[in-house]
Image: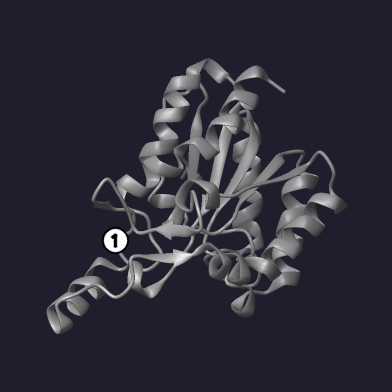
Amino acid sequence: MSALCAITDDFSGKPAILVLGDSHADQLTDVLADLGRTFSVPVYYSTKQCSLGHFGPGDWCSVQTFDSILHEAKWKNVVEVLSIRLFRIDREDVVLFRQNVRTVLAADFHLTIMENVPTAEHFDPTERALRAMKDGSISYTGLPVEKHSASMAEYRQLLSALVREHPGQVSTITPEPLICPSSVCEFATDGRPNYFDWNHLTQTGARRVMPVFEPIFRRVARGD
């Protein structure tokens, strides 16, 4: 059984991208597939929903599973691993996360890690509707960007350390400027919700952050 699932055509063995992530990566499948078709870059997802930082002891996201995924990725001409997941540093095994990063790099892939999208309980459309029914108004329309930045501080320190430790091998991208174009992270785009709960993007939100991935696809397409 294959460890990878293609979301684009194979484009005759051209350099490819492997997405490792959780349900947050799933919300970006259509966006990444469209970019793959635009740039003629094959895109693969793991058939098991295992994220960086989760490969280790256990049967589902085991070390053997990780090895199988990376081995098949190499065979399919993957050159870039893209990590998309919700990382809550107070609940994560940072040592295991670092180990997983080193495993990817040891297999000679370039790694790009996406920061968390801004999250807030009042981004949940159901929560907003309940508030509106209760008091006739919506109390919160967005999230102050300073609050999001504060929640990301420790994770950003970890990512900065990885970039310093592995120059040229690890990159990071952030959706913050696209969701938070000014001082507020926005719940909606042109009246359409960016989120379907407190932390997952809708297709509207996914399309809004699409530009953050374009440089990766251009680089892979050029063979850089």
Where residue 127 sits, quadrant-wise, is bottom left
List x then y, in percent, for residue 113: 64, 50
The residue positioned 36% from the left and 49% from the top of the image is 205
The residue positioned 62% from the left and 70% from the top of the image is 150
Element carrying mark 1? loop
Quadrant where the C terminus sits is top right
The residue positioned 50% from the left and 52% from the top of the image is 182
- Vertical order, 185 against 72 (above or below): below
**Residue 29 seen:** no
List x then y, in percent, for residue 156: 69, 61
Q: Residues within 10 Å of mark 1 (few under 14, many from 20)?
A: some
- Vertical order, 144 against 108 (above or below): below
List x then y, in percent, for residue 37: 42, 23
List x then y, in percent, for residue 99: 76, 62
Q: Is residue 71 shown left or right of residue 200?
A: right
Q: Is residue 44 shown left or right of residue 201?
A: right
Judge by depth and name the residue closer to the eye, 29 or 216: 216
Residue position for label 1? 196
Give the colour scheme of this rendering: one colour
- Vertical order, 173 against 193 (above or below): above
- Vertical order, 186 against 155 (above or below): above
Where residue 149 sits, quadrant-wise, is bottom right
The residue positioned 32% from the left and 66% from the top of the image is 197
Judge by depth and name the residue closer to the eye, 15 or 85: 85
Q: Is residue 127 shown left or right of residue 106?
A: left
Q: Is residue 195 shown left or right of residue 135?
A: right
Q: Amino acid at mark 1?
A: Phe
